[in-house]
Image (cartoon, rainbow, N blue to C red):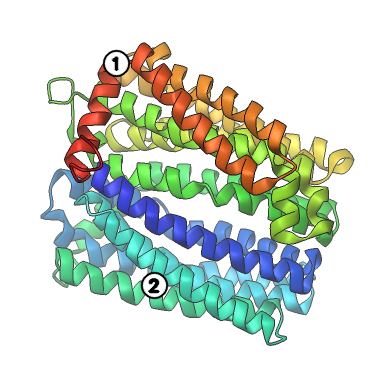
Amino acid sequence: MARNTTIRAVAELVSKFASLALIAVLAREEGAAALGVLVFALAWCEIATSLIEMGFDAYFLRRVARDRTELDRCFFNVLTLKLVRAVPVIAVSSLLVWLLGYDEATRTAVYVLTAALLLDTLSYTIFAAFNAVERAELIGVALATQRILTAGLGVAALLAGYGVVVVTVMYAVGSATGFVMALALLARHVRLPRLQLPRAARRDLRRRSLPFATQELLSAGIARIDFLLLSALATPTVVGHYGAAYRLLEATLFISAALQGAFAAMYTYLDDRSDPTIRTVFQRSIKLSLALLVPSGITLVVLASPLLKLLFGESFTQAEAALRLLGPTVVVLGIVLLSTTLISSRLDPRSLALYFGLALVVNVALNLLLIPPLGAAGAALGMLVTELVIAALALRTSLRAVGALRVTATIGSPFVAGFAMAITMFVLQGILAVALAAGVVVYVAVYTVVERRLAPADFDFLAGVLRSRLPSKIVP
């Protein structure tokens, strides 16, 4: 877990900041309206391609984690099913974006990004294989290659005077490179599955992936419907402002993604009699998520204005209210991802479809109610409330399955240290670099002191991990 989380988190960190750099240059060079075109096109294509993924990867991961011989039986069948589904989905998506009367730049961006995200969804099948055999660090390598190449090509195109459509072409080039890299890593470090296409396996994949498909479709709707509703109810500039705030939230998701990948297989094969037990591992995963995401959320809340000004320019400070509301969402999303991963790994995934269906209704209702008077802030508030609903439902189901957590030992240190960090950053917010550095130092110091008192066993466990991973001169 420590190896997979650390290596993938570092790679995801590099990837996220490369993508953020591209968005920042686009915002400064082309303005909020162009950024609005890109984030709308991405949202549209992510919802469309979710109809291609259809839960195959989640079920594929679950099967391979339990029995690695399933890699040969299922891998190329999953890719085949995705490619077959892609034909009608892409055709309908392209027709709809034309019928709805979007401008030429938006339509072209959607067409190009649809092809790019098709390549991405093929890569996700390889990533599922990596997670199933607990080689999540390989995902980080492939993602970092793709995102750094995309960002480099996109920034070069923008500085050369090209616009948002050329940026989407660079995204497609990066996606193609990432797919080839992922396939090469699979062949070298795991093994290239045998080219098998058993019809019985395809039927089984279609049938058993349906509960996962429903949850993934609803999840994609929750994550992106706010952009589509903003485009219908507000101006492209407002969409761009919300997109800038949301990109800062997404810049923190490398932590949740790394943890999700590290724990997914463990959630599948551990039980009440294993050592460690599933309850212990789930508790530590939630605690680790809080420990890493609380400071991220606090930073977005307290330093919203200077961060937006630094990255996107003075005009994007209008997204400050939206970013302050998305800050707590960072922490809630971490709990959602771990809880839903546990449910999909070992429980009946149909419950997730119910939870996400209810949350989607809440999300759409809140967006329709809040966007007209509040704009980007209304969409952000709707997202926060929606994620709280999912977190409450999924965490309750997870705890009923694995047992109750020790509340004080789990949440005490992150929240006490986070409170101290927030005060420090608020006092020093006029100097961004100083506020960030001082906030991190205070958080680590207070966390260490509180952890030794509230959860000495967890503190000793973490110290042991560090001693085993770091040179003796660093950790005595």
Do the residues bearing badges 1 and 2 touch, measured as CB atoms within 8 Å?
A: no
Look at mark 2 in the image and give the residue it sits on.
178
Above or below, comparing residue 83 to residue 50 in the picture: below
Q: Residues within 10 Å of mark 1 (few under 14, many from 20)?
A: few
Distance between mark 1 and mark 2 Cα atoms: 43 Å
Quadrant position of residue 396 = top left
Q: How many marks?
A: 2
Circle 1 — which element? helix
The local secondary structure at tag 2 comes to helix
Give left or right: position of 248 versus 354: right
Q: Nearer the viewer, residue 86 or 131?
A: 131
Other residues around mark 2 within 10 Å, as few (<14) / some (14–19) / many (≥20): many
Quadrant into which the C terminus falls: top left
| Residue occupying image coordinates x 58% and y 24% | 420
**Residue 237 horizontal/vertical position (percent):** 83, 60
Q: Which residue is mark 1?
A: 456
Residue 315 to residue 371: above or below:
below
> What amino acid is labelled 1 in the image?
Pro
Pick out the residue farthest to the front.
473
- The residue that appears at 38% across and 54% down in the rendered structure is 10
Is residue 227 in view from this perspective?
no
In the image, farthest residue toward the right: 373
